Amino acid sequence: MSGLPEIPDATVARLPIYRRSLVQLISSGESTASSADLADLAGVNAAKVRKDLSYLGTYGVRGVGYDAEMLLIQIDRALGLEFETPVVIVGMGNLGQALAHYGGFQSKGFPIVALVDASDDKVGQEIDGLTVSHFDDLARTVSENGISVGIIATPADAAQKVCDALVDAGVRSILTFAPTVLQLPDSVPVRKVDLATELQILGYYQQREGGEDAETA
Amino acid sequence: MSGLPEIPDATVARLPIYRRSLVQLISSGESTASSADLADLAGVNAAKVRKDLSYLGTYGVRGVGYDAEMLLIQIDRALGLEFETPVVIVGMGNLGQALAHYGGFQSKGFPIVALVDASDDKVGQEIDGLTVSHFDDLARTVSENGISVGIIATPADAAQKVCDALVDAGVRSILTFAPTVLQLPDSVPVRKVDLATELQILGYYQQREGGEDAETA
DNA sequence: ATTCTCTTGTGCATTGGTGCACAAGCAGTA
DNA sequence: TACTGCTTGTGCACCAATGCACAAGAGAAT
């Protein structure tokens, strides 16, 4: 779809952090950002910042740094943030409801436009200005609202079914909170967030306390 | 604290997944688990499973596989899951409240024993059987309850302050949901979960749809 | 005993990521 | 124009992670 030069996974995972740092610099009045500034705010090595940014085709100015506004645009283009990306949340349990209320998505360009659940208790209920629709109508909900991202906030045993339905409905990427491995086509990227898993990982490092840090994607 | 042989980060991050897969096998009646079985359930390569498990000092039986119960114990020992690990959640906004209700922590050995907020609206309120205590009393709350993990569910601008307070109070590891980089001593491991960041990362892969998958820790 | 089947444990080559260190190059000054 | 100070872009060497491929070993069957 685009002639971009292929950005390494590790770099992609850092771009949102750079973006956040950059926004912070801009809002504090800076019009240019050096790799050292960004590295400092992002908590990484300056050389890494430069190498990462070089993948964007962005070019900074030697002796000066990067044009802040310009860089922001480049990052947004790489991440596909030029336009808003409508999101549906499936599963209106505690987590799903919290996500529905969470303002962070809307403000970052990912408006939540639909909420879905399979239980009759939940369907029809109004949450944060949206009416919960039924899981059986998922395909219609997705197409009518031009939804491209699906968030799975159901228990593990329902996740694969929901995942399949989302893919069938035409969603183009998935974020799942269900503690299970999902089977899905390579063409649909997924990210998994498992809260209990995170604590378990911490357990290891806590035990051998005093050493290396625990990285997060 | 232990003479264990140092497990690579990538392996540590997979242990919880293996654990989940193993529990699944056990509950379906299996008493032994082969690396191929585990690989299948965990969605990874079988050789990787074997190499990962070899770090545990665990030994499987050639021609048979791993003793399921035994392996579970080994994994739990490596992750420090032999005993319960009490948790405090700081920040009782939407996310914090959802986490407080979320049963997944309790069932995985991380009981939530205290809730903390800085606003007078929230303090004193009862959530899921716990009374929200004041941020100023954090040190006491932590020591009285023997808390070793702190979860930060505050807005970004409060996160550093909360983080410092948690470390001072003696918490031994931190899980943060605040979209900001935290400064803290190397002796305290952290994991970061940023929901908006996850969606932004997906944006990249969605754009160049049809290719490589997006890994998550 | 011997043979056959199955599965582990690991050596090794490959790939991906990191960060140092330095040449290249711009802007401002004299 | 020449010089100085600062910052970029990247070559290179190092380290971690991956996964193939195979020898070693356990147990069952003959």
Image (spheres, coloured by chain):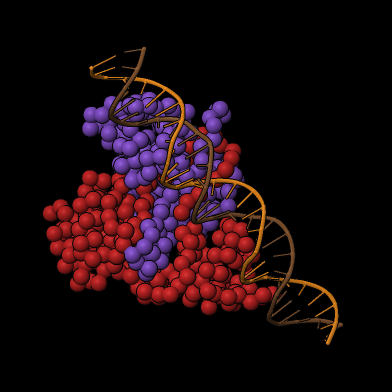
Chain colours: A purple, B red, C orange, D brown
Residue B114 shows in the view: yes
Q: A44 and C23: which one is in front?
A: C23
In the picture, measured across the screen, residue B63 lies left or right of residue B90, that is right
Residue C1 lies in quadrant: bottom right
Residue in view at x 45 percent, y 72 percent:
B4
Q: A118 and C23: which one is in front?
A: C23
In the picture, measured across the screen, residue B205 lies left or right of residue A88, that is right
Give the vertical position of B173 relative to D13 (above or below): below
Q: B206 and B216: which one is in front?
A: B216
In percent of width and height, residue A71 lies at 38, 28
Residue A107 lies in quadrant: top left
In percent of width and height, residue A153 lies at 43, 52
In percent of width and height, residue B108 lies at 40, 68
In percent of width and height, residue A54 lies at 46, 32
Residue in view at x 14 percent, y 63 percent:
B137
Residue in view at x 50 percent, y 43 percent:
A9
